[in-house]
Image (spheres, helix red, strand yellow):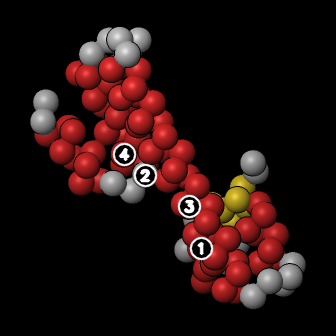
Amino acid sequence: MSETTIDPQLSTNRQVPQFVAAAHNANAHSKYTTIKLWLTSLYFLMQIALTHADSLLDFVAAGQLGSYDEIRGELASAYKDAGLSDVANFIVAAS
């Protein structure tokens, strides 16, 4: 999915999915709808990161990825990407 910068008042120069920018730029939707689409896209990105973390743990439990210590950094990164910095910090600190 390509990304475009939208109105700085809404995005503070963050990159957002093209469908969000198109909704805003075409004035097809209110600002509320644009923000709702932005939050929905963030939610899906968080879900992808959590699914990645879940898969890592499943593969370790199944014996397909080695040990927990080997995936600790990647697991912490996935939780951080999902917005769970405290969980990521705990994983790193527990080494």
Find disc 1 in the rendering and name its residue.
11
Find disc 4 in the rendering and name its residue.
79
Q: Position of residue 23 (x, y in %)?
A: 80, 74
**Would you say residue 43 is visible in this rendering?**
yes
What is the spatial separation of the Cα atoms under label 2 and label 1, in whole angstroms? 19 Å
Find disc 3 in the rendering and name its residue.
42
Q: Position of residue 84 (x, y in %)?
A: 33, 54
Q: Of circles 2 and 1, which is in front?
A: 2
Q: Position of residue 15 (x, y in %)?
A: 63, 60
Could you say whether the residue bearing mark 4 is in a helix, strand or loop?
Answer: helix
Q: Of circles 1 and 3, which is in front?
A: 3
Could you say whether the residue bearing mark 3 is in a helix, strand or loop?
Answer: helix
State which tag comes first along the sequence, 4 or 3.
3
Amino acid type shown at disc 2? Ala
* 69 left or right, relative to 6: left
Find disc 2 in the rendering and name its residue.
82
Could you say whether the residue bearing mark 2 is in a helix, strand or loop?
Answer: loop
